[in-house]
Amino acid sequence: MLTKLTVILAFLLCLHPVVVSAQAASTYPEIPIDSKTLRVQEQADRVYERTDYERAFFIYRNELAPIGDKYAQYMVGYMYLAGKGVREDHVTASAWYRLAAERGTKEFIKARDRLVSRLDAGEMARSDQLFVQLRKDYGDLTVLMQALREDFKALQARTGSRLASDTSPVAVINLNRPSGSRSGSDYYGQIERRIQARLEYLAHKTQIEIIDIDVASLDLNRLEQQVSEYLQALN
């Protein structure tokens, strides 16, 4: 007889694209997924479907969950709960479910709330501790700060190079795009817009006051320290 949790899992596996679109509709500024990550996601699902649970758990836990893949984070929690490929541990499962529900995806919230409601006071305290650590390591804000730093480095690389300004008559080659190339102003303008969207999300989510979002004056080290301090507490 199917349990309610099995039904939820089947729903998520069958409607994987629906979960992705639900994430994309959130206010979280999505980080583009490259072709390599897509291949890893497909591999994890295939391995799980053929019941090689230990290998599937390894991929979800060590390759996809650390880059903020909410479906993978959910699957890590589910596999802890069901004891598939890993020792059964419903408290650890609850912490992963809480991480997966970070963006408000309703299926993940329902699974989280159902499991958390079954924890006693001691288990809830351990779940809190595990969740805070997981959020520091793999949560949205941590992943977002990593993406911010990468974009910031890309803009800094423009300075002092042959790209004297973003209006220089150069073509930026993007090997990930079949269309080939685009102008420097388009390329760096897109990076600046991404940085702005990410800073606005951080300010809204954490209440950290970001007075100036001008990338030229952004103190990224200070911002990382503030985000780290925010993540220390169970918000």
Image (cartoon, rainbow, N blue to C red):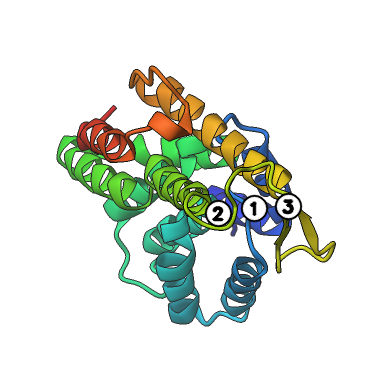
User: Which callout, 1 or 3, points at the residue further toward the start of the chain?
Assistant: 1
- Residue type indicated by callout 2: Tyr
- Residue type indicated by callout 3: Pro
Q: Secondary structure at mark 1?
A: helix
Q: Secondary structure at mark 3?
A: helix
Between label 1 and label 3, give the one nearer the viewer. Answer: 3
**Mark 1 and 2 residues: CB-CB less than 8 Å, in contact?**
yes
Q: Quadrant of the C terminus?
A: top left
Q: Is residue 60 visible?
A: yes
User: Which callout, 1 or 2, points at the residue further toward the start of the chain?
Assistant: 1
**Mark 1 and 3 residues: CB-CB less than 8 Å, in contact?**
no
Q: Residue furthest right?
A: 179
Q: Secondary structure at mark 2?
A: helix
Q: Residue furthest left?
A: 122
Which residue is under mark 2?
A: 71
Q: Residue at x 60, y 53 (%)?
A: 163
- Residue type indicated by callout 1: Leu
Q: CA distance from mark 3 to mark 2?
A: 10 Å
Which residue is under mark 1?
A: 12
How crowded pointer 1 is (Cα within 10 Å; few <14, some 14-19, many 20+) is rated as some
Q: Is residue 84 visible?
A: no
User: Which callout, 3 or 2, points at the residue further toward the start of the chain?
Assistant: 3
Which residue is under mark 3?
A: 17
Front-lying residue, 31 or 42 = 31
Q: Residue 188: horizontal and vertical position, in percent?
A: 63, 44
**Mark 3 and 2 residues: CB-CB less than 8 Å, in contact?**
no
Residue 167 lies left or right of residue 9; in this view the side is right
Q: CA distance from mark 1 to mark 3?
A: 9 Å
Front-lying residue, 84 or 59 = 59
